[in-house]
Amino acid sequence: MAAPRPAPLLLPPPPLLLLLPALLLSAPGQGLGYSAELAFALEPSDDIAVPGQPLLLGCKVEGTPPVRVTWRKNGVELPESTHATVLANGSLLIPHFWTERPGSLSEDEGDYECVAQNRFGLVVSRKARIQAATMSDFHVHPQATVGEEGGVARFQCQIHGLPKPLITWEKNRVPIDTGDERYTLLPKGVLQITGLRAEDSGVFHCVASNVASVRISHGARLTVSGSGSGAYKEPTILVGPENLTLTVHQTAVLECVATGNPRPIVSWSRLDGRPIGVEGIQVLGTGNLIISDVSVQHSGVYVCAANRPGTRVRRTAQGRLVVQAPAEFVQHPQSISRPAGTTAMFTCQAQGEPPPHVTWLKNGEVLGPGGHVRLKNNNSTLTILGIGPEDEAIYQCVAQNSAGSSQASARLTVLWAEGLPGPPRNVRAASVSSTEVRVSWNEPLVNTKEIIGYVLHIRKAADPPELEYQEAVSKSTFQHLVSDLEPSTAYSFYIKAYTPRGASSASIPTLASTLGEAPAPPMLSVRVLGGSSLQLLWEPWPRLAQHDGGFKLFYRQAGQASFAGPILLPGTTSSYNLSWLDPSAVYEVKLLAYNQHGDSNATVRLVSLRGASDRTALSPPCDCRKEDAANQTSTTGIIIGIHIGVTCIIFCVLFLLFGQRGRVLLCKDVENQLSPPQGPQGQRDPGVLTLNGIAQRERGQLGQEEKRVDAKELEQLCPPAGVVGRPSPSPTVSAPTPSHSPLSTSPSCPAFLVAIDLSHQPCPNSRSALSTQLKPGREVVRPQPLGGMRSDTVPPHATPVRLALSPQDPAGLATCEETPLSMLPLQGFSLVEGRTVQAKAPCVDPVATLPSPDVGHRLLPEGQAAQLAHSGQ
């Protein structure tokens, strides 16, 4: 058991002693301000009182005098007595504070409020919680510890008290030296000793003190043994941070004690990655994090890490810090003045952690929603509709959370213009029909000359007031027919008279209900379930149940005199099945809705079960599984057939499209080969066969689809008439004609190629370009436009080129005779194979078979021509 010390004699703080005479001698009314508003300049605050000592709760009010100040304790007005005195400036003095008053069950602990009132209204201060100073026994005593030299020792004690006890430590009954950096004292009752030495051994006591008492814990012995072995030890966190809940401006202590060999490095971080900051942050001892003057932004999870130096080996521990903030206003309500009959609105917004709850007071009484009062946006907006003299008051917004409370006030002034009419009198409402009500009234008693009209306010009696709507009425009319109402529904009506100066106060509300009516006929549909069953379907009407209603169902066979039924069904029903019917009969079904005002018109349906019965009789019993499988197989076959057909059609279309595209591309290629060179007409020489001198850029434009064949291949592709039964058109030999010098030599090419283009149907079985090789020093002979032949000499070092055969119009083809095309051996020129090329020519004028002198040609690309020349050697 802890050895208690005698509690020291505690006196009130000197400032309180100095203030008491002045407060007690203050004259009535002194210290009060004289502003038009009634508000608090000073409110009481939470406090901890010492039993048997005086307690002073401050309160100062500003407002138009006279101002009366009273106090409430736990919501009940505190009577004047010698035990509690209200001072002249409004403060409350309790000369002797007791937790248990002698001879009474009452105590002075509780929540106190200061109440001020003048002719404008009443305001209530924030609640001040008063608690008695206490000190409990230790519930955690320090424990004996054994440590090694150079190691760490830790003692802890815990005790509860109000106010929070101050913890100090003694070693061998002597206060420890707090100047020693090896000793770390944490406010929560922890003593840490680092770098232990032999002289640290001893008995340690924890001493807790506050204004209520002083207590000493049990002793705990520290034994320091010899130095450690120096072996490697993994980093270990002996004590990590605890979860803390604090209020703003307090100090947070996050403990972290780590050991290891070598001594680990302790670091701190936030789990959310945000920086801890440096302002108000310090590290106490070897790794304790101290945050002074905490704010809401300091809330979060803090991680303590112990790292082995030079490695990534680490151990971590974490704790959560929650910082609460008492409620405070970011927007205060403002005093307003509004004409009578209009709308007044107050707005206040408060913040805090946790978010505060907002309530409203009217002259000190809690104001809830209802009538013409609205609360919206989590009670932050107060709206008063149709204000009148009774609404003139002081309204307070009170924000409160677990960390504290705050209040703000504002006054509502209702402007009442002189000469306004009184409220309309004798308002009556009478039902005319199920959708109409007639409202009548008498004009006000006074100030009726300036009335310009009336406004009738209408709403359902069960609806909230915000669903109210209005209708304007002429000033000469004292009744109004309200239409488009709902049957069997209660409505509330009141009326106001309006003048150019403003509106009168509202009349006394009156209630009236519309007349009821029979419901409309329901929509009915019928479904045949089988040979002897019917299912009836309709929409449910829940409102029928509210008026003692429902549905009535009748049915009969067609031709019978009477119906079977009624079958009574509730309004929430939406279907009904009729069974055991005659399969060969036709049935008449009738459905109607009813309520307390009568029945609706009936909905009638005729339905025959004969068709369903016949279908059932004609269909023999079957294996449903087999039938379903057969249907599924048939359907699958149809689907597969459709897919195959569509696929074939797609392939055919693609074949035709690609074939047509190939023919078009081939024709374009031939046209490119036969197109004339770009140059002036006057520079062309149609009678000269150009063998070389082609520019490098023109060689690159030659076609690449021509085949090289010799004279033997030519005979095979274009046989004589005796071999091929059908004549073929004779190709015409032609050569490219460049725009520059027709003849030139190049030592790089020893041979010359002649190309014969058969792409335009030169013979039935070939569309290829033929070529043969000519040797230098020979001549090539070509037909002339006017008959005969023309020869040109191949230079000794001519560049190989390809000659194109230009066909005539295929439309001119006819049965032809053989016409030999001779190659004259001028100057020793001859074909390599020494053969004469023969082909069929169309039976037309020889001149027509010859190419035009202006037919253009193209050369092979340089690489292709060289390849052909090399292959021909």
Image: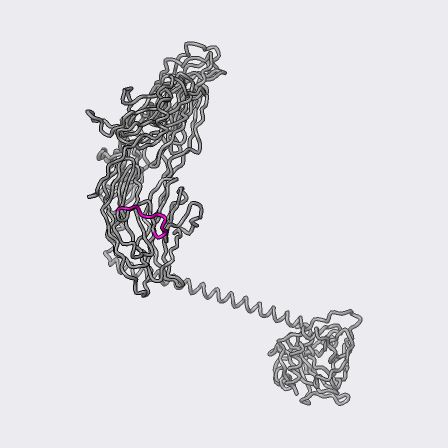
The verdict on residue 435 being magenta is no
On screen, residue 5 above or below 599: below
Question: Which quadrant would the N terminus be assigned to in this image?
Answer: top left
Taking the image as shown, residue 862 lies to the left or right of residue 550, namely: right
Q: Residue at the location (41% across, 62% down)?
A: 642
Q: How is the image coloured?
A: one colour
Taking the image as shown, residue 713 lies to the left or right of residue 185, namely: right
Taking the image as shown, residue 324 lies to the left or right of residue 723, namely: left
Q: Residue at the location (40% across, 36% down)?
A: 351
Q: Nearer the viewer, residue 391 or 521?
A: 391
On screen, residue 440 above or below 538: above
- Magenta segment boundaries in residue numbering: 173-182
On screen, residue 426 above or below 102: above
**Can residue 257 be seen in the rendering of this structure?**
yes
Q: Nearer the viewer, residue 97 or 301?
A: 97
Residue 578, image x and y in percent? 23, 41
Residue 59, image x and y in percent? 37, 25
Residue 99, image x and y in percent? 24, 30
Q: Quadrant of residue 33?
A: top left
Q: Quadrant of residue 473?
A: top left
Residue 186, image x and y in percent? 33, 47
Question: Which quadrant would the C terminus be assigned to in this image?
Answer: bottom right
Q: Nearer the viewer, residue 306 or 223?
A: 223
Q: How many marks?
A: 0
The verdict on residue 176 being magenta is yes
**Can residue 436 be seen in the rendering of this structure?**
no
Q: Main secondary structure of the magenta part?
A: loop
